[in-house]
Amino acid sequence: MGLGGVFEPFRERNYSLYFAGQTLSLTGTWFQNLALSLVVLDLTGSARALSGVTIAQFLPMLLFSIPAGRIADRFRPRTVLMTTSLISAALVAVLAVIVASPDPALPALYGIVAALGSTQAFERVAAQTIIFELVGPHLFSRGVALSTVTVAVSRSIGPGLAGILFQAFGAVPGMVVNSVSFLLVFGMLALIRPQRFHSRRTSGAAERLPMMRFLRNRIIVTLLITNVFIALLSLNFMVTLTSIVTIDFNGDGAAAGMAHALNAVGGIVGGFVAASIVRLRPVMVAVALVGFGATVLINAAAPSLMSFLIAAPLLGLGIGFYNSVLNATAQLAVAPSNIGQMMSLMNIGNYGVVPFGALLLGWIIDLSSGRLALAVGGVAALLAAGWVWSRVRGEPSEGEG
């Protein structure tokens, strides 16, 4: 397939606006997250305290993912996204005020981050649910795969600039950038034309698929369990990568930002490779996990900061391809009218169990090193690959509807 086919979703004006808005939002979030992580490490010197930020951010997603899926399937995802963008802008402004104080209180920081996490529980599900409405069935799988590129693009831009901004002016400007980014997202969403949406509604029983029917589908159960397992042990990169740079290798904020940015360069390529797949089958998740696990282990073996930075794009390639394949496969496994429910379950793994993984990996880092914690994630990915292969080999990529 030619390169033009990969970029075909961008011919839809609504999708281009969505992509730009998501990229702005996620870039701003990196400004905030890197600054906040460095503030907490500076205040405490503890990876466990840093994992507390991750817990506060992602635990609400475990609690609210299921309601978020129901809302995304009942109401327009665009309406949900416009609401969450305004709420998030206000909360980040409050966070900036707290960080600006001479002695920021950790409980106050955790509280605002938890409120942001609650809002993001609804925002993340809606951001995935809206893709079908933007591009329709023909371009759906490519639209989903390309949507994960927004994560990598933001990571290629955000951390490096955020590290430089932090070194020059401190943490507060990073919070301001994120608050403004949410307002820009609201503006992008306002420009989207609802009259050009593709309907996700179908007739008959598929319209309101009971949640328990998800648990009787072999492919869906496999994806959900794999997603939880990998999110628990392999995807806490804000904790592991930041700790490796700043604790294992004694790097500064700019070096931490560079590591995340280089990692993201590979993630962009990984997303585009996934978008080029003509027919996505569930077994590709196993293939993606093998590549992901291998690149994680290569980075974990890096003996110095320089070699770690050189290997970072390879890790990004593995992450980008895995995330794109997993999310596209999950959304293709259900009828369009049930994408919200499916993504709410996926977000339990994507975000909901992350706090527990952060706590575990923070404990490993404090006892040993960030590289050991990263290696645990690589081994977990390889084990998951074998399990997925045994369960979905030969399964077609068909939706329930």
Image (spheres, rainbow, N blue to C red):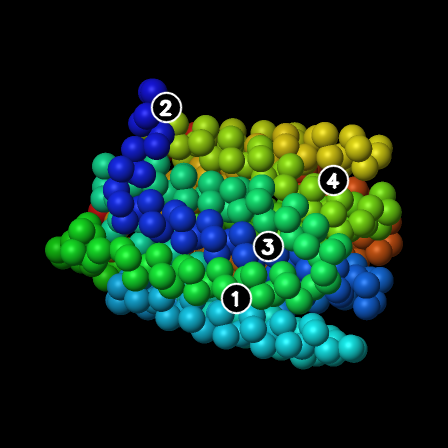
Q: Which residue shows up at 86% across the image and 54% down it?
A: 367
Q: Is residue 151 above or below residue 66?
A: above
The residue type indicated by label 4 comes to Ala
Q: Position of residue 41 (x, y in %)?
A: 79, 62
Residue under circle 1? 179
| Residue 210, quarter of the rendered image | bottom left
Q: Which residue shows up at 73% across the image and 43% down it?
A: 374
Q: Is residue 160 left or right of residue 84?
A: right
Label of residue 3 in the image: 2
Residue extending furthest toward the top:
1
The residue type indicated by label 1 comes to Ser
Q: Which residue shows up at 82% across the image and 46% down it?
A: 251
**Mark before the other along the chain sequence, 4 or 3:** 3
Label of residue 375 in the image: 4
Badge 3 crowding class, 10 Å Cα cut-off, few under 14, some 14 to 19, many 20 or more, is many
Query: Which secondary structure, mark 1?
Result: helix
Closer to the observer: label 4 or label 1?
1
The residue type indicated by label 2 comes to Leu
| Residue 144, quarter of the rendered image | top left
Circles 3 and 2, Cβ within 8 Å, touching? The answer is: no
Q: Position of residue 253 (x, y in %)?
A: 76, 51
Would residue 141 be visible to someone looking at this image?
no
Residue under circle 3? 30
Query: Which secondary structure, mark 3?
Result: helix
Closer to the observer: label 4 or label 3?
3
Measure how far apart labels 4 and 1 are at the Cα level.
35 Å
Would residue 246 be visible to someone looking at this image?
yes
Measure how far apart labels 4 and 2 are at the Cα level.
35 Å
Measure how far apart labels 1 and 3 are at the Cα level.
12 Å
Q: Which of the pair 347/385 is nearer the observer?
A: 347
